[in-house]
Amino acid sequence: MAISPLAAENLYKACDTSGMAFRTTDDLDDLSEVVGQERGLEAIRFAADIDQPGYNLFVLGPPGTGKHTTVRQILEAKAAQEPPPPDWVYLNNFETPHQPKALCLPRGHGRALEQEMHGLTEELRTAVPAAFESEDYRNRRQSLEDAAREQQEQAFRGLREKAEAQGIALVRTPLGFALAPIRDGGVIEPKEFNQLPDEERQRIESQIHVLQEELEEIVKQIPVWAMEQRDALRALNREVTAQTIDQPLDRLKTRFADIAGVLEHLDAVRKDLLDNLQVLLQAEASTRGPGAGPAQMISRRPGDGLKRYQVNLFVSGDEVQGAPVIYEDNPSLQNLIGRVEHISEMGALVTDFTLIKAGALHRANGGYLILDVRKLLTQPFAWDALKRALKAGKMRIESAGQMLSLITTVSIEPADIPLKAKVVLCGEPLLYYLLSSHDPEFPTLFKVAADFDGSMPRSNDAEAVFARMLATMARHEGLRPLARSAVGRVIERSARLAQDAERLSIELSAISDLVREADFFAGEAGDEVITASHVQRAIDTQVRRADRLRDRSYEMIERGFVFLDTEGEAVGQVNGLSVLQLGRFSFGRPSRITARVRLGAGKVIDIEREVELGGPLHSKGVLILSSFLASHYAIDRPLSLSASLVFEQSYGGIEGDSASSAELYALLSALAEAPIKQSLAVTGSVNQNGQVQTIGGVNEKIEGFYDICKRCGLSGSQGVLIPAANQKHLMLRQEIIEAVREGSFAIYPVKTIDEGIDLLCGLPAGVRDDDGAFPEGSINKRVEDRLITFAEARRRFGSPAGEPGRDESKHV
Amino acid sequence: MSEAAQPDQRVRRILVALDSSTFSEAALALAADIAAATTSTLSGLFVEDQDLLRLAQLPFSREIQAGFATSRDLQPEGLLRDLRAQAALARSALAEQAERRRIAWSFQVAQGRCEEAVLTAALGGDIIAVTRHFGPFGQAARVSERIRRMAARAPAPLLILNNAAANRPGPTVMPYDASPASEGLFRLATAICRARGDLLEVLLLESAEAAERTLRAEFEALVGERGSAGLRLSSPPNRTAALRRLSELDRGLLVLQADSGSLEPAQIELILERARVPILLHVEGDVSGKGS
């Protein structure tokens, strides 16, 4: 049952541009909708519309499928119809300054309040000093001071006069006062005092004692009088301040009368102004003076002076039209949830409410926030902070240092702000699945997934839409229009990128790169229109730029450093095909696979696996082919062979099961001792029933073996066995199609191992007859006979005298 | 303006009288400012007052401490220790003020009665800087009386400093009555203003209004073109207004003639009592005689 090779027409599905009704893409209208992502678009619109907690969106899809652009376009269109967000301001908390207050204001009122408060402080800077410089104030203050001084002087005067009447003077001492008897305008000499009669001395002492008690009482009163004077002065200052500030504050209250929270804040401002304004102004004046020294520098700290009355316009709604759509390119913790900045003052880091800065979540509040999930997950603490905010429905500004209690710098705790934003994460499917399985909070916070496809079905309609997409792309990027032929070539390339002749890749970044590069070559050639030749040149140069390692790899085979035959026959040896992926470039690489068999305990040793170079999928393939052997041949006897399989001269890891059919062919060849044609290469996985299954990278694999054959010389007998199901994936290079057409190369679609072994060995595989026996001379018969021989031998070794059998088993 | 009536514009020394009462940094700073302005020496004289030492030897003497309203026995050794500690502090403060302005300074300690010791140490060409409540009996009598009495005996102008209040910058103000003494005082005030770059505000009393042009010419001659000092001449509507202006001064420096013919002694005393600025007090005798 010889398999016919595929016809050249089946190796490539060309784009039929004859049915396209345009000359260049300039004739086509722009495409407003996104191509081929209907499922994803539905999900995005659903997530954007539903107003329930947890219905945030995860847009997953291969890179370059336009996830960001698409979601942004949809959200911006929706956001434009939605109301803009309110303003948020942070205000000083006069009672607990380390906990600034957050206040929500109607859109535009935040900036107005900020400007009004700035104007108020500027006004107070001139009005208040003027009030305190006024003659009225000075007179009243002087009057208070005079009264206080007079009160004190009167007390001393009374005492002094009383003392002087008794010949005693009030004397100023280094630390206070004393009373002394006077003679001739001075204190009496001790000698003279001692010469006085006893009665006189006692009288003086007694008088002084009484006066001292009175003096003590007066001195005790001094701090009380001072305090009374300070209180009176404070009351005067409050009165003068109130007269100055009430009018502008009342004006503000009238303007913001309807806004909750503002009036309370203005009342707090008034109270604080009354208590502190004059001191604050003096502090500001001293820090501005030329002689301001370190002591005055202390009062330059933020929060001092009139800065405490400022408004920190944290988020302003008047900066956007409609609801905000924010894309944060660097979603670090601080960029996400905001930060409290510090400034250095006298060697210390200090901060206040004016240094609170908004994060992307704040800016997106009331709208949408788009984040790249990979970037988000690689930023320390950012993912946790985002989840915490979404879960709590409010935003708390905390630095990483605060979270870990690493920083002891004086900081502040800004009040939380309610969060009502839709968060959209964009990323690869792998990240979505990992988060789904490893983060229990993820499914509850991101309930909607928009799954972007990497390709779409290919049809005439789809090709027409694709052409319009190319037209839109060219126009938007200022590229030359594409001729119909160029469109066809790009579509064909898209199918090749999709690895499927019946699908088109919609990984737009690769497509747009191709069109840009084709435009470059069109420009270089001085052409006004991009043609198929420019596209082909762009494809060729893309490959050329990336294929150095491929060249080196093929050169090694050509020069005989890597053993690979493209002619002749060999037992237990087959050409397998693998694909190497290097960035965005991949190529097929033929490898020699060999199998060796001997009597054993029924194990097929995968040498790649033994040395840990084979991945689990490769091992699975080897186990499947073992099972195939056991279930197809001599099923009434134990499988008694020991076989080893190896990818010769392979020094890197091998993964995937696409070589399992090749490995099985090598094993069958070794068992049947039937040589395999080395002019053929094989790819395809195999199941336990001997069916050859689809594999990936079929185009690269075929092209890889063709390139090697071409280097070594095409003989006409060379070709590749591929799984029959892979026929629809074929989008091969024109060069190979021509070779097939000329009969110098062949591609065989194989459905079963029997078909494959038939081709490879040139002998019939053989089908069991009614008696269950394979025909004599067939491959299967030879394999079964060999296995029976092994089984018999093993049975013999298994007898009491058969110790070697057990040894063999141990050896394996 | 006669030669004999002209004061000696050259100030050679600012003699700062210091005693047991708390000295004021601001007062010292003003004295040092004037010393720097007039390129004169700053000299500190700390007086260990004889009356205080006598008081300490009396058996019943007690000191009521102002800060704590407590009393303690006053012993001679303790008092002397306190005085010397204060002298050391005063010396240090004076040195700091002088060194900050890079002016020559000296410091000495004398014993005796405060006023006597200062007057003994003072010479012509000095400005004697004293605080309002200088001496142990500073609280005893009206400040103005004591100051005028001392000024009358002093061989040089007195600079009356406030004890504790900070000196507020402002113009140098003086009344002018066209008398030879006030002419001399005008020259002294001009010299200070020229050195400090201050504004000199002259209140022209009734009889002196005609002297305006002469004063301007003289001021320009004394200050020169490069000087930054300015002159403002004003004529109060009446004597009461002038008196009010002078007694309500709360910034700058007041230059005053102690025995002016235009202002009565009671009015001078009122100014001395009420004005809250340092006052440079001059007696005619030392302007024309001792100061030349």
Image (tube, grey):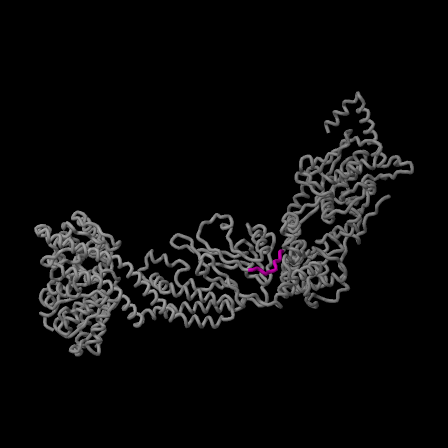
Which x, y percent locates residue A290?
31, 61
Residue B52 coordinates in the image, percent (x, y): 15, 53
Residue lying furthest right in this view? Answer: A770
Of all residues, the one furthest to the top in this rendering is A801
Residue lying furthest front in this view? Answer: A199
A73 sits left or right of A719 in the view: left
Instruction: Say if the magenta span includes residue A421.
Output: yes
**Predominant secondary structure, magenta span:** strand
Q: Position of residue B219 (x, y in %)?
A: 19, 71
Q: Nearer the viewer, residue A569 or A195?
A: A195
Q: Residue at x 77, y 29 (%)?
A: A600
Give the percent coordinates (x, y) of residue A295: 33, 56
The N terminus of chain A - image quarter: top right
Q: In the picture, which quadrant includes the C terminus of chain A?
A: top right
- Residue A767 belongs to magenta span: no
Q: Nearer the viewer, residue A385 or A204?
A: A204
Q: Horizontal placement of B135 versus A363: left or right?
A: left
- The magenta-colored residue range is A418-425
Q: Residue at 9% x, 64% y: name it.
A: B290
Residue B28 appears anywhere in the view: yes
**In which quarter of the view is residue A631 placed?**
top right
The image quadrant that residue A250 belongs to is bottom left
Of residues A570 and A89, which is closer to you in this image? A89
